[in-house]
Image: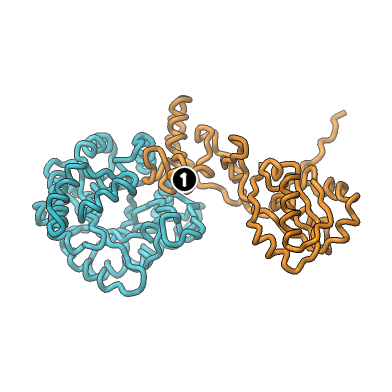
């Protein structure tokens, strides 16, 4: 899922400096699990903004905020509340926020969150980054553990000199990706694969902005 | 005195030292230290924004040392350059008369003085070694023909005290496969550990220079043990430095370094020694003399 962190209250208030009234949009997907776009987060935001003298005209929980057309339909019943607001504050990820930018052509739309990474939920409300969406998965060669993501240097061919009793020199909280990869490939009997030199990444696969269209399969008759 | 590659390939016990360019354009002190080393070392490494701290670029400093009469070893990291910049710097090194390049991934920006910088790591050390091989053969990384190849003697680094060691050894072998001609090791202090490492390294056709890091005092030794991965200073050496007192610590450290160089040379443990004095390069000739190397 997409991991978001709530911006500091002061930063959100500063963003809304020139705005008197706000409509809030949350998201039932990732941002709810992160607690940054859940009904509770929306209620807390309402309270914060009202304490700052802003009028909150209403709020809406999008089912999947990055789904542009679906969210547009969900917003229809709230038309009056939205019309009454100077700005929309979106409490989801950057994709959800920009979905609303697309929907509201002439209205100010602002983010309430910082979007940080693609995360695995490893415990309740603990998220770990395992994949950085490089567009060219190589974990078949690295024991199923991604060094592009879990090694701060993204090294593809083994540990650097900074591996420190199995931990990373960058932070004592990070396990050395290559110590883990080696241990796992030893267990799975794949160490020979680790001897092969892995070429540099093809960064053209990571070129932004990306568009991906799944073509409808024609039924074969 | 033979040049670095010539000495190493001839089987002569090869000595290299290391210079860290300063932050700022006043380079006089570094150059004066380097002058002390003329005729004493076969090669001299020039670090590349060492510890991810911004300093004068290694390429320009290599050229100055080359003009002084040194045979510089151009340290090149992948932290600050993508594959285009790496290749243009390698070609630049060639036309500036630099013959040796040490290929490294590079300390992470989080270790340095520009912690908000974007780390590059488009390549890493193994791929950088391969890249030097390609440029030496007359094509760029993508295989496009070059008008004039480079002629660079490429080497790499290895950490014999790395923990765990096995993944490090596997990478060591990859670096050899990728074209490393020589290795300069991270600082080593425990000779038995180093012997065990060399027993394995000797199975490969590659030259190894043992990393000797001058201990200035017991505090530095403790700092290395605590904060620098892959370096272990045995308690026995720390006790020696302590016993020497504040005044005598540096002298004791020089003795320790000299003794290490002497043992490595006499016992043929490695093909040479890479003496790192971190700002005290003027002490290196004295260390070499104490080691019995004229």
- Report the residue at 46% width, 59% height from top: B80
Q: Is residue B58 above or below residue A103?
A: below
- Report the residue at 90% width, 55% height from top: A79
Residue furthest front as drawn? A51
Instruction: Name the spot of residue B248 as percent of width and height, x first.
Output: 12, 57
Q: Which residue is mark 1?
A: A155
Q: Which chain is cyan?
A: B
- Determine the secondary structure under disc 1: loop
Tell me if residue B149 can be seen: no
Tell me if residue B213 can be seen: yes
Q: Which chain is orange?
A: A
Q: Is residue B220 above or below residue B66?
A: above
Q: Nearer the viewer, residue B157 or B215?
A: B215
Chain ID at mark 1: A
The coloring applied to the image is by chain
- Report the residue at 79% width, 41% height from top: A215
Instruction: Name the spot of residue A196 as percent of width and height, x first.
Output: 45, 36
Q: Is residue B244 above or below residue A194?
A: below
- Report the residue at 75% width, 69% height from top: A18
Within the image, what quadrant is residue A111 found in? bottom right
Instruction: Name the spot of residue B161 as percent of width and height, x first.
Output: 29, 40
């Amino acid at each position: 899922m997409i991991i978001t962190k709530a911006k500091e209250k002061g930063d959100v208030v500063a963003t809304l400096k020139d705005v008197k009234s706000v409509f809030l949009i949350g998201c039932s997907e990732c941002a709810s699990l992160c607690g940054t776009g859940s009904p509770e987060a929306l209620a807390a935001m309402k309270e914060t903004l009202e304490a700052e003298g802003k009028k909150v005209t209403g709020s809406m929980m999008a089912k999947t905020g990055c789904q542009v057309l679906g969210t547009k339909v969900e917003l229809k019943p709230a038309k009056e509340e939205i019309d009454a607001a100077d700005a929309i504050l979106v409490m989801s990820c950057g994709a959800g926020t920009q979905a609303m930018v697309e929907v509201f052509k002439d209205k100010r739309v602002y983010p309430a969150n910082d979007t940080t990474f693609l995360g695995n939920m490893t415990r309740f409300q603990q998220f770990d980054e395992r994949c950085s969406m490089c567009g060219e998965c190589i974990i078949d060669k690295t024991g199923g553990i991604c060094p592009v993501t879990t090694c701060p240097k993204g090294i593809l061919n083994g540990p650097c000199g900074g591996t420190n009793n199995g931990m990373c020199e960058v932070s004592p909280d990070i396990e050395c990706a290559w110590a883990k990869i080696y241990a796992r490939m030893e267990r799975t009997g794949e160490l020979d694969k680790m001897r092969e030199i892995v070429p540099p990444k093809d960064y053209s696969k990571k070129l932004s902005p990306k568009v991906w269209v799944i073509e409808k399969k024609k039924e074969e008759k | 005195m033979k040049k670095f590659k010539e000495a190493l390939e001839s089987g002569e016990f090869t000595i290299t030292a290391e210079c860290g360019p300063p932050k700022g354009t006043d380079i006089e002190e570094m150059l004066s230290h380097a002058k002390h080393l003329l005729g004493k070392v076969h090669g001299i490494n020039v670090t590349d924004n060492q510890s991810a701290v911004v300093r004068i670029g290694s390429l320009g400093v290599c050229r100055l040392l080359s003009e002084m009469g040194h045979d510089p070893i151009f340290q090149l990291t992948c932290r600050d350059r993508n594959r285009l910049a790496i290749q243009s710097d390698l070609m630049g090194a060639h036309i500036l008369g630099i013959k040796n390049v040490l290929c490294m991934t590079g300390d992470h920006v989080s270790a340095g003085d520009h912690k908000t910088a974007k780390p590059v790591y488009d390549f890493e050390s193994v791929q950088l070694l391969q890249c030097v091989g390609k440029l030496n053969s007359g094509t760029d990384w993508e295989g496009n023909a070059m008008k004039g190849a480079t002629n660079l003697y490429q080497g790499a680094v290895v950490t014999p005290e790395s923990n765990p060691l096995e993944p490090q050894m596997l990478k060591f072998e990859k670096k050899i496969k990728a074209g490393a001609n020589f290795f300069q090791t991270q600082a080593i202090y425990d000779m038995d550990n180093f012997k065990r490492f060399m027993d394995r390294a000797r199975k490969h056709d590659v030259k190894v220079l043992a990393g000797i890091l001058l201990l200035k005092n017991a505090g530095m030794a403790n700092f290395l043990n605590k904060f620098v991965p892959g370096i272990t200073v045995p308690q026995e050496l720390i006790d020696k430095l302590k016993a020497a007192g504040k005044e005598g610590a540096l002298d004791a450290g020089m003795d320790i370094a000299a003794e290490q160089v002497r043992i490595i040379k006499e016992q043929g443990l490695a093909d040479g020694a890479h003496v790192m004095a971190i700002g005290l390069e003027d002490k290196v000739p004295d260390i070499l003399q104490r080691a019995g190397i004229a």
